[in-house]
Image (tube, helix red, strand yellow):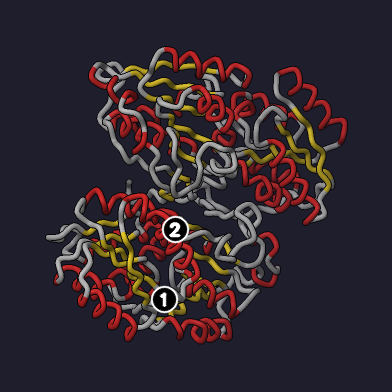
């Protein structure tokens, strides 16, 4: 992964894939590429796909062949396309163009590896068993763009607040359509906004939907996430322009085609990942990871067409003041419901309350803060001119965080910037009015920080690396690196609720790889002393360290202990590996997760909006 790629690793499915699926690689392997889209509107996406393949060592026509199958927006063709590729015994199937492609490919084969690209929840869609242990022959990337409809509705309403009726274009044949409609209706009721639904799944129905929107008097337009609409984006954008309708779409492609506004993730980055995944499988990789786009380098959330500003001026619509390069990282975005008082202060120098669980002199902590400031600088915000940092550090004493957060709230700061479970909870307890921009390694819904990914509610937004969902994968990697390992010590902070869930996942995964676990809990320096002494007294075969604010603050001590006792160690953050001799320790020390500096750089993007 590149430094700017902030992805959530969700576990590998290919370990159990039959060897027959890999045996074809002796000759030139063939990739079966099927899509609900059309080749004409996917040229730039195929360039990204081929780039991912090339970076993995495969060039079309030289050492890999690709057979393409296109549904051109007609989803009924997809099962036959998948069956055709299976009959040709391709080495891997890439099912692009949304949920419908993946759902058609999966029942077609249980042996050929499938790389999917979808916009929804792969667990809910039945593509994988769970995020941490997908199982089967399916892996891929989810953009979660289907779950962003409520946020798009809120943005469109903010863009054109005087519009009494908003039109929404939905494809009833798209598998997530019912959920999209439900989310839109709930979001509309929550903000007392009238909406009218127009449905289309083919060209005749699309023209009828256009006529219906005009007849109903829709004053703006929301085009829901759907591959068929992507294939007809020029026609849809032209309709909105003719009717002078402010409109919002899912991908930047629409804005490039002349649409007013797009809000979503980078689809070209996703196709690049499809290529990288396919390359890993062609190489016989037995543990490819499953990605979920978590909206960092992949977020292109706000893109606006160049001549759209004239339309806004003619409609007397207030501008956001956003630059073309500004990306809004989202968990659906909570700011729509935040008090106007929190936004009215933007002309002044904004106070950012930066809550650090460790010490500011720690190189990693200093690097994270620097990455955060770099992200703001990239967006045109300079410390001292546009904002002032109010720093508070707990020095590894997590019990100090609530008092420090309360101190920041009393100043008051305009925004909290926090990373990790304990600082987030402290900021939320200190104020339910001050916006909280978070970075988290776990599930923000399960941790109680947001109500849902699509509609977080409250005053919290930000991003999650979903690193704890890798508990089972880390044990698999540990067993691969240290095959002799049988007894493993697990060092973790039991006062962190998300780590309790991680411990349960680790316990469930241990028997499947033949490991016996011993839990060593520590949430203070004194408890850490006792835990390390216990490990040294009954030396295990390896050490697993759950990363959170506490263990990260003491990673130097933990890493030195592991090296001194020649203990192989694994954690979800590479900062632990870098502590142990610059990432090249004499004993295996592995990390399995996204890099947190890139996460903190991305967290500056929500901050820049308020």
Front one among 65 and 210: 65
Image quadrant occupied by the C terminus: bottom right
- The residue singled out by tag 1 in the image is 356
Give the left or right position of residue 150, taking residue 453 as reference: right
Residue under the image location 75 percent in, 38 percent down: 168
Rendering quarter of residue 61 = top left
User: Up-down: is 255 above or below 513?
Assistant: above
The residue tagged 2 is 505
Q: Residue at x 37, y 21 (%)?
A: 31
Q: Nearer the viewer, residue 330 or 543?
A: 543
Indicate left or right for 414 with 289 as reference.
Answer: right
Tell me how far mark 1 sits from mark 2, CA to CA. 27 Å
Q: Is residue 342 above or below residue 88?
A: below
Q: Decide if residue 601 is in sight here.
A: no
Of residue 434 and residue 332, the one placed in the foreground of this image is 332
Query: Badge 2: few (under 14), some or many (20 or more) residues near its Cα, within 10 Å?
Result: some
- Work out whether 504 lies above or below 267: below
- Mark 1, mark 2: which one is toward the viewer? 2
Q: Residue at x 39, y 37 (%)?
A: 273
Task: Tell me what residue is drawn at x 82 percent, y 26 percent.
Answer: 211
Give the label on residue 189, or none: none
């Amino acid at each position: 992964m590149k430094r700017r790629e902030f992805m959530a690793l969700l576990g590998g499915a290919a370990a159990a894939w039959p060897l027959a699926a890999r045996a074809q690689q002796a000759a030139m392997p063939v990739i079966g590429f099927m899509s609900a889209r059309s080749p004409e509107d996917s040229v730039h996406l195929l360039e990204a796909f081929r780039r991912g393949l090339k970076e993995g060592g495969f060039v079309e026509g030289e050492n890999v062949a690709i057979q393409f199958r296109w549904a051109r927006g007609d989803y009924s063709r997809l099962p036959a396309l998948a069956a055709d590729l299976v009959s040709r015994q391709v080495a891997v199937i890439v099912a692009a163009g949304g949920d419908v492609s993946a759902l058609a490919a999966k029942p077609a084969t249980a042996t050929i590896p499938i790389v999917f690209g979808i916009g929804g929840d792969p667990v809910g869609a039945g593509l994988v068993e769970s995020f941490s242990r997908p199982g089967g022959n399916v892996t891929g990337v989810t953009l979660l763009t289907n779950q962003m409809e409520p946020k798009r509705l809120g943005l469109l309403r903010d863009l054109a607040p005087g519009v009494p009726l908003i039109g929404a274009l939905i494809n009833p044949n798209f598998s997530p359509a019912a959920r999209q409609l439900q989310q839109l209706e709930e979001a509309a009721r929550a903000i007392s906004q009238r909406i009218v639904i127009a449905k289309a799944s083919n060209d005749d129905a699309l023209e009828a939907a256009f006529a219906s929107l005009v007849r109903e008097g829709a004053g703006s337009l929301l085009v829901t996430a759907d591959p068929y609409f992507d294939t007809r984006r020029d026609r849809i954008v032209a309709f909105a322009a003719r009717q002078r309708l402010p409109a919002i779409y899912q991908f930047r492609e629409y804005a490039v085609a002349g649409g007013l506004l797009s809000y979503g993730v980078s689809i070209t980055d996703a196709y690049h990942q499809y290529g990288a995944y396919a390359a890993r499988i062609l190489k016989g990789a037995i543990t490819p990871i499953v990605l979920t786009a978590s909206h960092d380098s992949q977020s292109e959330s706000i893109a606006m067409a160049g001549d759209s500003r004239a339309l806004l001026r003619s409609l007397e619509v207030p501008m956001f003041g956003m630059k073309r390069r500004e990306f809004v990282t989202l968990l659906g975005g909570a700011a729509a419901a935040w008090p106007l008082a929190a936004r009215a202060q933007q002309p002044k120098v904004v106070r950012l309350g930066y809550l650090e669980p460790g010490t500011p002199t720690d190189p990693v902590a200093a690097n994270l803060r620097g990455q955060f400031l770099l992200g703001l600088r990239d967006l045109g915000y300079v410390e001292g001119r546009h904002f002032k940092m109010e720093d508070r550090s707990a020095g590894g004493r997590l019990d100090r965080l609530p008092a420090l957060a309360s101190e920041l709230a009393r100043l008051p700061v305009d925004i909290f910037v926090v990373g990790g479970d304990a600082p987030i909870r402290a900021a939320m307890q200190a104020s339910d009015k001050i916006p909280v921009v978070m970075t988290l390694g776990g599930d923000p819904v399960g941790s109680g920080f947001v109500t849902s990914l699509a509609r977080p509610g409250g005053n919290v937004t930000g991003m999650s690396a979903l690193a704890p969902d890798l508990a089972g994968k880390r044990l698999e990697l540990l067993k691969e690196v240290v095959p002799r390992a049988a007894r493993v010590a697990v060092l973790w902070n039991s006062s962190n609720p998300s780590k309790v869930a991680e411990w349960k996942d680790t316990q469930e995964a241990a028997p499947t790889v033949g490991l016996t676990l011993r839990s060593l809990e520590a949430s203070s320096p004194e408890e850490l002393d006792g835990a390390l002494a216990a490990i040294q007294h009954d030396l295990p075969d390896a050490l697993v360290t759950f990363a959170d604010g506490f263990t990260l603050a003491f990673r130097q001590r933990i890493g030195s202990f592991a090296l001194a006792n020649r203990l192989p160690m694994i954690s979800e953050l590479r900062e632990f590996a870098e502590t142990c001799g610059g990432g090249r320790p004499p004993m295996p020390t592995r990390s399995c997760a996204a890099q947190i500096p890139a996460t903190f750089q991305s967290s500056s993007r929500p901050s820049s909006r308020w």
